[in-house]
Amino acid sequence: MKAAIFEHAGKMVVEDVAKPQIQAPDDVLIKVIRTCVCGSDLWSYKEGDHKQAHSMNDGHEALGIIEEVGEGITDLKVGDFVIAPFTHGCGQCAGCKDGFDGTCDNHPAPTNWGGGYQAQYIRFHYANWALIKVPGKPEDYSEEMMKSLLTLADVMATGYHAAFCARVKKGDKVVVIGDGAVGQSAVIAAKMMGASRIVLMSRHEDRQKLALESGATDIVEERGEEGIAKVREILGGPADAALECVGKQAAFEQAVGVLRSGGRLGYVGVPHEDNLNLWELFSHNIQVAGGSASVTTHVKNVLLDAVLKGEINPGRVFTQTYSLDEIDQAYKDMADRKTIKSYVIVD
Amino acid sequence: MKAAIFEHAGKMVVEDVAKPQIQAPDDVLIKVIRTCVCGSDLWSYKEGDHKQAHSMNDGHEALGIIEEVGEGITDLKVGDFVIAPFTHGCGQCAGCKDGFDGTCDNHPAPTNWGGGYQAQYIRFHYANWALIKVPGKPEDYSEEMMKSLLTLADVMATGYHAAFCARVKKGDKVVVIGDGAVGQSAVIAAKMMGASRIVLMSRHEDRQKLALESGATDIVEERGEEGIAKVREILGGPADAALECVGKQAAFEQAVGVLRSGGRLGYVGVPHEDNLNLWELFSHNIQVAGGSASVTTHVKNVLLDAVLKGEINPGRVFTQTYSLDEIDQAYKDMADRKTIKSYVIVD
């Protein structure tokens, strides 16, 4: 089968590799029909980020058709149209049952993330609970709807997770840090939860426009201390919640800086700088929660329904479309901010 | 008036100093009748901790009688019996209104903590909202009840804050780290909130006994990785919530280590080592919340009533009594773990 291979920083290629196989009773094999590039895939593309040269891609978002099921699979069958999340919750541990399947306690690996989804086929483990069945067939849906469904594999669920972790509630003044696909999704989620003000920190006109159409009420272009002061000026005081969708220290500090005493910080950017100043949090009772998104929980409980009913249109973050053979361009354009998120059609 | 003075690490003295005076409309002057020593006072007593030699004591817990009121005071009068919290919430900002008055947004200083309460008189600012009136007169209460009332100035409210921040709920498996007065209070709070299991990490028999009488179900003496393994063994898996009542890195790591995916960590130990490993939190969706306790909120909403009805008896943490003149001994015995918390009667 064809799969995208990380050749080295700045270079993705497509190669023929062995088709994956069922390995465990709870596995399924999926024929991928749509995949995409994630902001987190770009860490290695842009900087290497310790990723081994000539290794399988980090892609972890896909729509597909079930090709084969393991013997333990009871709730899915060959031919089902599914969303393949980047997470693999077991659905049975206390964490999954409490809605935190993105970091399932029963998962053997350091994270329960998938990889290698930029390919014609993937093996998906913990499939019975974690995979999400979509009603009908792919051909029942418009390409616009397919895009929105694909965001449910990661970015829309991840943006929602930021708002979920920050426990955004009706009337909250919310600040979103990060204007990429996850930040855009966090804006949508904050609106779903009834925020009265949604301030997006953004310097890019196309992203500002998209967010304003999705429910953002204000844009702040300034960063750091200036950005914090501007947010407080616009809101007439500090914010109730901040959604950190970047994963960098500066973004985190900005999030802390805009919050009131007892403010809630939801973070979903994969942390690339590890340290939190605990004193700063303590001295303002800042509540911090975040991690890998509870994709299966959020999608099954809320998001699939909202997408199918057309209440939200998160697929608009896909502003360019590519074939799998064009994967390097899909990465490059996203790294160069020529597209918010790259959508890939797989034959 | 007489006041305790921090002479240098290991030495408190009592000296005559100027009686404080009303400085602002929202001030009151309080004649102190009971005070005590806090675990946080011991940081400087044991190690210096950057505190200036020959300076006013850090005491911040008192019961007293209002001696004089500022012109802006509407809800209190001379002669009222009051609990003087260590915090000074304004009661009007978004933080205070949301129940986080321990880090009031309107407070001018870096923290809103009081100090100097180990003295015959104190000036208390933001008094109108933050001070807590106790019904009747001191002579209406037994000394045991006076002790429980005094814990509401800090430790009982602080232990409760840990459980409040960790959002402990009915049926939760809770681990308490720290067996001092705050840890003991956290055990009481976890029980009030309906925890099904309360594991206290403790190596001291007197403290273990007190906690078991207050609602702890299990004791773990081991620390670090061994302690984490023991907790998981006792609970048959990870905990839902952990209450960190120490303020040291090792305690924090232990708290993180016992939690499940999506577990909730409430921390109230004043952070003395500043860094949190964000990746560790992210990869388990650990929710972290804490800070200076919402003393006025918790006491007015829940704790004063629970103490007056005899439902909780947090005053049992005071295992030795001293006069103000014996303040050095009161510090020394607590530093040497000869008493859990030192109770001071002021004439």
Image: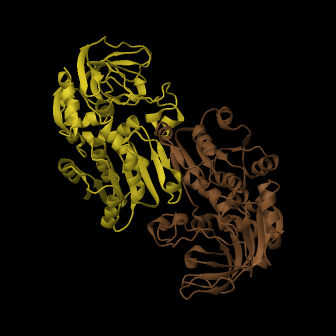
Chain colours: A brown, B yellow
Q: Which part of the image, by quadrant, shows the N terminus of chain A? A: bottom right
Q: Which part of the image, by quadrant, shows the C terminus of chain A? A: bottom right
Measuring from the top left, give residue A133's x and y in whole percent: 65, 76
Which quarter of the figure has residue A86? bottom right
Q: Residue A173, can we see it? A: no
Q: Nearer the viewer, residue B101 or B41?
A: B41
Measuring from the top left, give residue B277's x and y in whole percent: 50, 51
Q: Residue A150, can we see it? A: yes
Measuring from the top left, give residue B255's x and y in whole percent: 39, 53
Q: Nearer the viewer, residue B129 or A293?
A: A293
Residue A144 vs residue B345: left or right?
Answer: right
Which quarter of the figure has residue B239? bottom left
Measuring from the top left, give residue B18's x and y in whole percent: 31, 10
Q: Nearer the viewer, residue A335 or A316?
A: A335
Question: What's the residue at 35%, 38% (across, down)?
Answer: B299
Which quarter of the figure has residue A242? top right
The residue lying furthest to the top in this view is B18
Q: Nearer the viewer, residue B297 or A103?
A: A103
Residue A181 vs residue B323: left or right?
Answer: right
Question: What's the residue at 49%, 56% (across, down)?
Answer: B280
Image height check: is B127 above or below B225?
Answer: above
